[in-house]
Amino acid sequence: DAKTTQPNSMESNEEEPVHLPCNHSTISGTDYIHWYRQLPSQGPEYVIHGLTSNVNNRMASLAIAEDRKSSTLILHRATLRDAAVYYCILCGYNKLIFGAGTRLAVHP
Amino acid sequence: DSGVTQTPKHLITATGQRVTLRCSPRSGDLSVYWYQQSLDQGLQFLIQYYNGEERAKGNILERFSAQQFPDLHSELNLSSLELGDSALYFCASSEEGVRQETQYFGPGTRLLVL
C-alpha cells in the first residue's frame, strides 16, 4: 500500500527558508502529491500540489524528485504564522493517503 | 471561511450511544470527504462521496456510516460509541472529487464520549 513518511517535527527561524521533506516511495504513476497545513484550532488548508513538475504558488514551492519517490515543500521565508502541522498526501484514483504530518515551529 | 459548514461544533455523549454529524459543502461542490483526528494524532481519511455515491473508503469502522443526500449535504453516523471515538471530525468538499483538486475543510465537530 502507498504511504507517506514525514519527520515528526522541524524548527526554523523567522525569515529563513524551510524545507519540509516527504517520502512516498510506493507512489503510483497517477497519484498527485498534495500538501495541506493545519494551523492551531483550525481545519486543514490547501498549500500546493503537483504531479511530476516542480510547482510554485504564492504560498510555497513544491519540488518533486525525478523518480517521484519523494518531494519537498519549500517555504521561502518562514513567518510566525507558518507555524502549523504540514501534511503530505497522495491523491489517487479512489484513494487518499495521508502522512502523519510535520509540526513546524518558527522562532522569532 | 472555507464555505464548508459543520454542525454541531461540539458534542458530548456517553459510551454506547449514537450520534449524527452534519456537513454542508461549498456551493457547487459535488464531493464530500470525512476525516477523523484523534487527540494529538494526524488526520485519518474515513470516506468520500461524490454526488450521492460512495467513491473512496479509508479507515472507517463498521460502526460508522455516512451518506450524501440529493441536496449534497452529508451526514456521518457514529454508533455504539466508545471512549476512543472521542476526536475532531472534519468534513471537506471539492468540485468533482478528483485527485488533482483542492479540498476545502470545515471547522470540524469535536466529539467527546464519556
Image: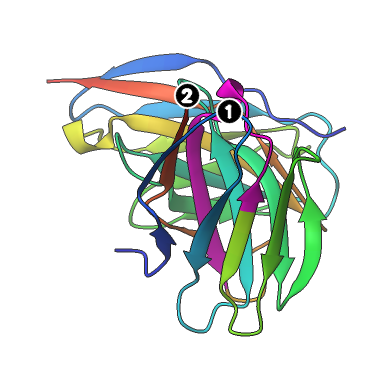
Q: Determine which residue is flagged by label 2.
A: B114
Q: Position of residue B64 (x, y in %)?
A: 72, 45
Label total for image: 2
Q: Is residue B90 magenta?
A: yes
Residue A55 highlighted magenta (yes or no): no
Instruction: Return the x and y of residue A92 as percentages of the image width and height.
Output: 78, 53
Q: From this viewpoint, is residue B3 visible? A: yes
Q: Chain of mark 2?
A: B
Q: Residue at x 73, y 31 (%)?
A: A24
- Mark 2: which amino acid? Leu
Instruction: Name the quadrant of the C terminus of chain A.
Output: top left
Marks 1 and 2, how far apart at CA:
6 Å
Most extreme residue toward the left, as rendered? A108
The relative height of residue A90 versus residue B50 in the rendered view (above or below) is above
- Rendered image quadrant of residue B81: top right
Q: Which residue is mark 1?
A: B15
* Residue B68 position in % (x across, y down): 67, 71
Q: Magenta segment range? A: B77-94
Q: Amino acid at mark 1?
A: Thr
Mark 1 or mark 2, earlier in chain: 1
What residue is at 52 percent from the left and 36 percent from the top? A87
- Quadrant for the N terminus of chain A in the image: top right
The residue lying toward the viewer, choosing from A5 and A62, is: A5
Find numbered disc 2 in the image and state the secondary structure of the residue it sits on: loop
Label 1 environment density (alpha carbons within 10 Å; few <14, some 14–19, many ≥20): some
Q: Residue at x 45, y 53 (%)?
A: A46
Examine the rendered structure and indicate whether residue A29 appears above or below residue B7. Answer: above
Regarding mark 1 in the picture, which secondary structure is present there? loop
